[in-house]
Amino acid sequence: MITAALIVAAGRGNRAGGEKPKQYQMLGGSPLLRHSIDFCLGYEGIARVMVVIHPDDEAHYRSAIAGLEREPRLLPPCLGGAERQDSVRSGLEALAADSPNIVLIHDAARPFLRHDQIDALLGMLKQVSGAILAVPVVDTLKRAEAGRIRGGADRQGLWRAQTPQAFRFQEILAAHRQAAGLALTDDAAVAEHAGLDVRLVMGSEENFKVTEASDFARAERQLLLRLPDIRIGQGFDVHAFADEPGRPLMLAGVAVPHERSLAGHSDADVALHALTDAILGALGDGDIGLHFPPSDARWKNADSAAFLRHALALVAKRNGMLAHCDVTIICEAPKIGPHREAMRDRIAEIAGIGRDRVSIKATTTEKLGFTGRREGIAAMATATIRLPG
Ligand code: MG
């Protein structure tokens, strides 16, 4: 039984304002779209994740999935069409090659997915062809023209549809092919048009759609309320200089031009090692040596970004986020200042967070001690993570 998630992110989101489409704007330090991707990858029953993007957004998409390039469950994105319905159909056609049994179709603008709701949707599909999240309408409804009330409408039996909407794959693919050209506003309407039995599953107000610019502030508040367990971890690391010809000096993910390089089993990126340890410390989950034993040949000359990604994946697995990190590099040379911004950008890229959440500092030890004698480089880091309560 293969369950796929199709995340629709091909809209322009004009109502939200901003320089880029809303699905690429930041929420809690990572792009709005990334929240849904991380959730789907963190839900064990979802075997494939595909995102439908706008043809103009390929660069935005690449930066939104930074660190997930080698995630086998995240399939290459599919390009969307003029209307949402066209985009979903394109996505379903692209997924068809993989023959999933079930598909969850989800809007990228709803970042607050919940495990129990997905469980309920998938449970419902054991009996019927489709199931969608929805919430009952509780407000009294009014019909108006130019602001003047012209009667009302009975709210009895009315629900507001949300996503994800879950379907048996072959049935919804056939329904979409059949409905091509019709202007239907969601996949439940497409399924209904094909005569499929689609049921409601109780959604939540928390699962709201980020639409207007002000919704980002609401989403930020909601995100932080969901992650009240704030933890700080620290890390420290030292690597000695070695003069292996041709070996680059890697610091915070950046190759720094210098006549010397550091010794170590991996690429010896002392700054990323300290940061990885800080994150593991905040999780209370051992240290880098425990997760990546130096005795293991796999890590020889390894890109230390892999260690950082592993620690971040552990945070994501617990539905948490990296809120901030602060790295201090301690050496007499090379000068860090000229590379500071590149280092911030690189860590922000690996972590999928805003660069304002990444700090790189440098200091010397006034020619004292081993760093003062230029025998090696030390790095210290703190990481602040937020976890669900
Ligand atoms: Mg190390």
Image (cartoon, rainbow, N blue to C red):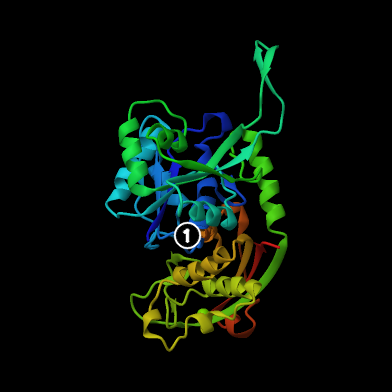
Q: How many marks?
A: 1
In terms of secondary structure, where does tag 1 sit? helix
Q: Residue furthest front?
A: 127
Q: Residues within 10 Å of mark 1 (few under 14, many from 20)?
A: many
- Horizontal relation, residue 280 to residue 265: left or right: right
Residue 236 image offset from top left, x and y in percent? 61, 78
| Residue at 72 percent of width and 26 percent of height | 140
Quarter occupied by residue 147:
top right
Name the side, left or right, on which 284 lies relative to 85.
right
Question: Quick one: which residue is furthest to the bottom in this view?
Answer: 295
* Quadrant assignment for the C terminus: bottom right
17 and 38: which one is in front? Answer: 38
Q: Quadrant of the N terminus?
A: bottom left
Please name whichever residue, 328 or 321, is drawn nearer the observer in this view of the structure. Answer: 321
Q: Residue type at mark 1?
A: Leu
Give coordinates of residue 379: x percent, y percent.
59, 74
Residue 169 in view: yes
Residue at 63% x, 75% y: name it.
281
Q: Position of residue 189 (x, y in %)?
A: 45, 33
The residue closer to the viewer here, 337 or 71, is 71
Coordinates of residue 2 in the picture (x, y in percent): 37, 59
| Residue that numbered label 1 is attached to | 41
Vertical arrangement, residue 15 with respect to residue 99, above or below: above
The answer to which of 333 and 103 lies nearer the viewer is: 103
Outermost residue to the left? 97
Tell me if residue 352 can be seen: no
